[in-house]
Image (tube, grey):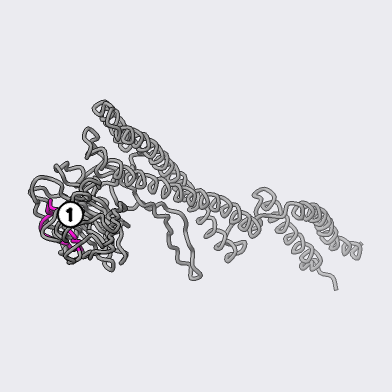
Amino acid sequence: MSSILTNKSAMVALQTLKMINSNLAKTQAEISTGRKIASAKDNASIWAISKVMESDVKGFKGISESLSLGESTVAVARQASETITELLTDIKSKIVAAQEQNVDREKIQTDIDALRNQITSVVNAAQFNGLNLLKGTEDVNILSSLDRAADGSVSASNITISRQDMSTTAGVLGTGTDLSPNATLSATSATNAGNTATVTIATDADMSDNTLTLTIGGATLSYAVGDLSGNQDAAASKITGDINALGIVGVTASVANNVITLTSTRAFEDVALSATGATASASFIAERAETLTFSASANVAEGDGYQVTIGSNTFTYVAGKGETFEDVAKGLKVAIDGGSIPGITTQVVQNSSNQWVLKIDNDSATAQTLARAGAAGGTASGGLFGLDKIDVTTNAGANAALDNIETLINASIDAAANFGSAQGRIEIQSDFISKLVDSLRAGIGTMVDADMEAASARLQALQVQQQLGIQSLSIANQSPQSILSLFR
């Protein structure tokens, strides 16, 4: 049945042409935009995922800039720390030269002062965009990543850079928890008298038949039969004279009846003692030094401060972040040595119980009172604390400086190593972020970008279909005209 009111063929041809035109418009849009999913109406879920990932890409671009800024800041600090290490090494060479007696120590001290001022200049200049990692103790966080969890929540990750205070500032003792129980003094006074041991000669009435060997600090006296005549008192007197004639450094002998008293004023060294044919009261004469022994079990927190008072002089060291009792002991040594108290010398050792010990010796004309204190919550001493107190114009100052410069060099080396490690980590993270952004972009492109080869082929096919559709619609529209022949 044919109808001039309803042309089904034309309707079918028209719908087909509309569908072809719609596909053609979509393909042309893909080619012009380069995307197969350009808006949410194209594919809502894929579009939403791509937008989330695009926001992450923009975030990672910001992170890359943050890492670049952080890397530059750390690089400045590392270079400054390495320069400080070189300058401290130069100071060490000057201190070594000052150990000689026939040098102009005043001129050497002038050179040391100039190098020290240069170190201060380096510390003050070691900043990037106003941030100086060689001052203060607060950590610096550098944004390093955005971590998206499965539930869609996002959290930031940071690379934490520990500041390395290379200043010479003195610490300030806090008013917090009493820490004095962590440090034990061996005495409340540093005596200038030596420690003693005795050697008792045999009580034989006649010493002519005796042999005797006595070893003191590596020096040996040997007596054969007949060398010691008379009674034990006479023998003791002869041996005492012979000991003093040896000239053993820091060791003197005196006699009372048949007992020889050996006195040692050696500061940080026991004197070995042995006797054959006589009786020694000990196997050594103890060193002359009082000790401040730190706990082997307690921990050291940032701001923990300890004080030592010698006579009327008080010396303080306040620990920085990550320091131990070794640092505290060495810090107090530097402080005491810098105080230049006549006759006072120090040494830091670790005993058999793994405790760090500060030894204090008094070689002055009078005894010195000793006291100690400790408190939490203080302001940390600078990493180069004591550098400004180095003085090689005296024998004692030159000797103390040789020990203390090693502590300062180690501090600067540790600082440079920490900054170098942090810079390496930042570089690795920066490289990873760059590759991650490329991977995210590639993933987003896989989801939303158009396949241009397929789009090109599809465009040509649709253009042909469009022409055929137009032709079909034209034929369908001509069909009703054939009905006119029935009315002729």
When asked about the image quadrant of residue 202, the answer is bottom left
**Side (left or right) of 43 relative to 337:** right
Specify the principal SS of the magenta part: strand
Residue, far bottom: 1
Nearest the viewer among 218 and 52 is 218
Mark 1: few/some/many CA within 10 Å (<14, 14-19, 20+) = many
Q: Tell me where the magenta segment starts and ends, as one range.
A: 183-201
Residue linked to disc 1: 263
Question: For the point 57% across and 59% down, which residue is it?
Answer: 50
- Where residue 290 appears, as percent x and y from the top left, is 18, 57
Q: Is residue 348 above or below residue 79?
A: below
Question: For the point 50% across and 56% down, which residue is it?
Answer: 55
Nearest the viewer among 486 and 55 is 55
Kind of residue at disc 1: Thr
| Residue 197 in magenta stretch | yes
What SS does tag 1 mark? Answer: strand
Question: For the point 14% across and 61% down, which residue is it?
Answer: 258
